[in-house]
Image (cartoon, helix red, strand yellow):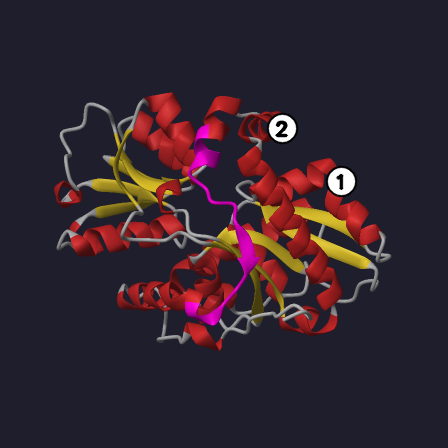
């Protein structure tokens, strides 16, 4: 294992167990060697475009023309996924929230940005029960707030509190998974929940919760696709194909929202109407990464360092960016 969980304080023991569990469930090995024609793709439940490409077989068909075979490995969240990428157990990471590469970099991971999904600030939000007396972020002072540590929603919470003149020390954070956070909100065990789609739309539908604050003006909420430094240098033609397929699928989802939601509903076992609502808030506009577009990554890094989540400051511009051969 690398030092992803040993260097970033809050994730030490828990993340180590999550990574080992995810690796076991995915059937991964600790070995780095693999056949040149095999591409191992890691993804998570919120990896919409990758999920659709896996289901349709389109990406596998496109890569088969390059004599590349694809294997798929699902993870419960972005941090274990990038740990597997850093340790050589997967070759390519489907989209993770903007905060996740920052945590990986803070732990010394050697990763490369491949592509991004354009900003989707409304696709994550702070929710409160419909009958809550909380009317503004300032009203969260002294309240218990569920949030997933290290997720994009974690940064949204920090940014919203800062704008309201509060620090995270003036609330009681409950670090929970989206599913556990939703249950806590519905059960009255927390006063607010910070979460992203499709979990956001699901929580709204199931509990009638209302949006107190989304990411507008606070957090762009981009999602990034990554690979290892060595893979980026060695297999650019494969990355060209992946990015082209992701772009096309993102355009298809926005042009066919109902059909896309129905396909995902069959896979995720979530009501299609909920998925369609969540998808409407995601851009799904895939493009290669430009250095100037990563400006918010440094803000995220500084915010987490300020909260003591990183042992030292990091410079996000140090992370390499893959460039297609045509650029």
The x and y percentages for residue 62 are: 78, 50
Q: Is residue 30 left or right of residue 12?
A: right
Q: Is residue 173 above or below residue 52?
A: below
The x and y percentages for residue 59 are: 73, 47
Q: Which mark, by number, is residue 57?
A: 1
Q: Residue at x 19, y 56 (%)?
A: 162
* Residue 17 seen in the current view: no
Q: Residue at x 46, y 58 (%)?
A: 100
How dense is the environment of label 2, judged by Cα within 10 Å: few (below 14), some, or many (20 and up)? some
How dense is the environment of label 1, judged by Cα within 10 Å: few (below 14), some, or many (20 and up)? few
Assign a secondary structure to mark 1: loop
Q: Quadrant of the N terminus?
A: bottom right
On whether residue 95 falls in the magenta region, the answer is no
Q: Is residue 184 left or right of residue 278?
A: left
Query: Where, by quadrant of the figure, is residue 181 drawn?
Result: top left
Q: Which residues are magenta?
A: 277-292
The x and y percentages for residue 21 are: 60, 48
Question: Which is nearer the eye, 310 or 212?
Answer: 212
Residue under label 2: 263
Q: Residue at x 67, y 69 (%)?
A: 326
Q: Is residue 159 above or below residue 232?
A: above
Q: In 3D space, how far apart are the residues under numbered discs 1 and 2 (Cα atoms)?
A: 13 Å
């Amino acid at each position: 294992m690398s030092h992803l969980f040993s260097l970033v304080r809050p994730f030490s023991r828990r993340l180590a167990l999550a990574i080992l569990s995810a690796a076991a469930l995915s059937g991964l090995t600790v070995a780095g060697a693999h056949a040149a024609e095999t591409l191992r793709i890691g993804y998570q439940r919120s990896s919409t475009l990758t999920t659709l490409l896996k289901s349709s077989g389109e990406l596998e068909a496109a890569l088969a023309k390059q004599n590349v075979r694809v294997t798929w490995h699902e993870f419960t969240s972005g941090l274990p996924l990038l740990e597997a990428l850093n340790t050589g157990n997967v070759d390519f990471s489907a989209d993770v929230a903007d905060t996740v590469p920052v945590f990986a970099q803070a732990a010394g991971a050697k990763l490369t940005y491949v592509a991004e999904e354009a900003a989707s600030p409304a696709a994550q939000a702070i929710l409160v029960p419909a009958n809550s007396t909380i009317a503004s972020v300032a009203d969260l002072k002294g309240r218990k707030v569920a949030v997933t540590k290290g997720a994009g929603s974690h940064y949204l919470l920090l940014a919203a509190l800062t704008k309201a003149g509060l620090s995270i020390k003036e609330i009681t954070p409950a670090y929970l998974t989206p599913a556990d956070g939703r249950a806590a909100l519905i059960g009255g065990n927390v006063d607010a929940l910070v979460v992203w789609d499709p979990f956001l739309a699901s929580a709204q539908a199931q509990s009638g919760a209302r949006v107190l604050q989304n990411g507008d003006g606070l957090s762009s909420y981009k999602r990034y696709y990554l690979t290892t430094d060595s893979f980026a240098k060695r297999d650019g033609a494969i990355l060209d194909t992946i990015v082209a397929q992701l772009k096309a699928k993102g355009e298809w989802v926005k042009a066919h929202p109902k059909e896309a939601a129905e396909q995902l509903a069959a896979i995720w076992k979530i009501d299609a109407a909920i998925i369609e609502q969540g998808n409407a808030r995601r851009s799904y506009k895939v493009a290669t990464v430009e250095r100037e577009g990563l400006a918010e990554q440094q803000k995220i890094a500084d915010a987490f360092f300020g909260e003591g989540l990183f042992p030292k400051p990091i410079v996000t511009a140090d992370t390499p960016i893959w460039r297609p051969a045509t650029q």
